[in-house]
Image: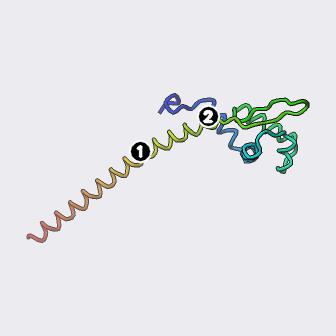
Amino acid sequence: MTEERLGTGPAVDNVLSALADPTRRKLLDLLAAQGEVTATTLAEGLPVSRQAVVKHLAVLDAAGLVSGSRVGREVRYTVRPAALDATARWMATLAADWDRRLAGIKRIAETAEREAVAKQEREERERDSL
């Protein structure tokens, strides 16, 4: 399968890379639950410094998962679901492809099993008729 067919590319790669870190996943969860918040507020719920939170938010921002907007002296961050939605669609397509492949393997295995049982039954009938 080509990258174009699967819809992968830099956007999906960036999202998956950003979500590989548990701290960034926690930040995304907190943002989704709390709405628009500052890095300081987010840092209060995590065992990392505010500066570390800002760096993690920059990675999430680069992946298109969050955005920051200045309100006075503060930068407030919010979740941007579009990149996550695109990644979820890619994952669903990939899962559907694997489901089709596994269903094909299952059909082949079931057919082979039926043929083996039928052959064994034929051989037993032939042996019994002798």
> On the picture, is 110 further left or further right than 48?
left
Give residue 129's quadrant in the image.
bottom left
Residue under pointer 1 = 101
Residue under pointer 2 = 12
Q: Marks 1 and 2, how far apart in space?
A: 23 Å
At label 2, which amino acid type do we have?
Val
Residue 16 in the image: state x and y as whole percent: 64, 39
Residue 40 in the image: state x and y as whole percent: 87, 42
Label 2: state its secondary structure: helix
Tell me: residue 110, above or below residue 87. below
Give residue 56's quadrant in the image.
top right
Residue 105 in the image: state x and y as whole percent: 37, 49
Residue 113 in the image: state x and y as whole percent: 29, 58
Label 1 neighbour load within 10 Å: few <14, some 14-19, many 20+:
few
Label 2 neighbour load within 10 Å: few <14, some 14-19, many 20+:
many
At label 1, which amino acid type do we have?
Arg
Q: Residue at the location (46% across, 44% down)? A: 98
> On the picture, is 46 further left or further right than 115?
right
